[in-house]
Image (tube, grey):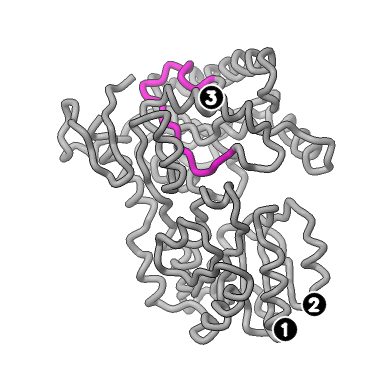
Amino acid sequence: MMTTTTTTADGVNGPMTGKSLKDWSKELRGRDILCFSHDWSGDPLSKTHLMRILARDNRVLWVNSIGYRAPTASKADVSRAFKKLAAAATPLSEPEPNIFVLNPLAVPAYGSPSVRAFNRRFLRWQVRRAMRKLHFKRPLNFVFNPAAAVIAGALGEEMLVYYCVDEYTQFSGVASQSLAELEEGLLRRSDLVIVSADRLYQSKAAYNPNTILVRHGVDFTHFRRALDPETEVPADLARLPRPVIGFFGLIADWVDFEVIERVARTFPEASVVMLGKATTDTSALERIPNVHLLGRKQYSELPGYCKGFDVALMPFRINELTLNANPLKVREYLAAGLPVVSTAIPEVEVLGLCRIARDEDSFVEEVREALKDPGPTEARSDRIRQESWEARLDDIRRHLATM
């Protein structure tokens, strides 16, 4: 493993170990990279964007999710289990150049020492087999999923990076204590820990002094298409009454339905639109006439939907999970040139580009103010131009050049 040095959240580097800063551009090029993350077929997240850029100059073995919560007997969990078994029949594919996807099997329960031991042996065998097939040698291992701690560091890696973008122990259904133990071990033995929010930095740096803060970027060019005259607003949105007050993303238990209902009832002439897969009960919203749940949309379609929005919402509940979050959708809304109204999530406040509400009353008032300058504008989009994923990867390269 590589010799490390301390890097603070402000990007202040300690003494360098044989490399000069001018060498940073050579980092993360011509390498074999492991990535333990969510399923490749899911919505593009921070890790998807970063690995796609890295695949331009490297080979990436993307290991689909091994799960960090025990499954239930729910229809969704049973369906997911069958999909995992079916995917394992074709364990290795190349959906994009230089990105190879492995569909591993594991027992998604980490409280039992015997289950952990089984997963460690079985996962290691599956990943090693894929590495041999691809002729991977001394890879750099980027771990986004803390459950992968069971094998991280046991795959002949040259370097182990834990890239933490959430407080995973706060997700519903997670065996918090077991996952916390796994994560603590991963934090302590990682060569570098990267976090996406200041609150995560404050908690994770206590376990590893070589922890850095790299906030999320944005696929600016993609979402800027909302301002392109040739971009069409999809028909299911175009037919709805204006103004359109919109949201896209996973509709989960961290979304504040009470705030959305309040907005919908305050602006009955407006259409409140929610795009995304729902993993929680949405019946309360479905009963409101001007709330429209249009389902999950392809990533390629999102600029068109943004073009049809007048105001974008970031209505997360305030709890330990969301206080540690850095919602990617906010930068995507802004790149599309939209006015954004958000609850008081620290990483949204840091941006300084959104309207922040402290309660339901102020949320409604901020939406009212945002509607005075609705829809995508170039000026709003331009303010986020420098927040690209390429720029974020350059930040990581600079840090690696000091190690």
Q: Marks 1 and 2: in contact by CB < 8 Å?
A: yes
Query: Is residue 399 a member of the stretch shown in magenta?
Result: no
Quadrant (top left, top right, bottom left, bottom right) of the C terminus = top left
Q: Position of residue 166 (x, y in %)?
A: 53, 43
Where is 323 relative to 384, above or below?
above
Residue at 40% across / 60% down in the picture?
Answer: 350
Which numbered tag is attached to residue 149? 3
Give the Cα separation between the discs numbered 1 and 3.
49 Å
The answer to whether residue 4 is left or right of residue 169 is left
The answer to whether residue 137 is left or right of residue 301 is left
Q: Position of residue 282 (x, y in %)?
A: 78, 60
Q: Position of residue 197 (x, y in %)?
A: 44, 48
Where is 373 relative to 92, above or below?
below
Task: Say which residue label 2 marks.
Answer: 289
| Towards the viewer: 99 or 16 | 16
Q: How many marks?
A: 3
Answer whether residue 232 is visible to the viewer in this image: no
Q: Marks 3 and 1: in contact by CB < 8 Å?
A: no
Query: Is residue 160 a member of the stretch shown in magenta?
Result: yes
Q: Which residues are magenta?
A: 151-168
Amino acid on which disc 2 is placed:
Pro
Provide the secondary structure element on which disc 1 rests: loop
Task: Say which residue label 1 marks.
Answer: 268
Q: What secondary structure is the magenta-colored segment mainly?
A: loop
Where is 7 relative to 343, above or below?
above
Amino acid on which disc 1 is placed:
Pro
Answer whether residue 261 is visible to the viewer in this image: yes
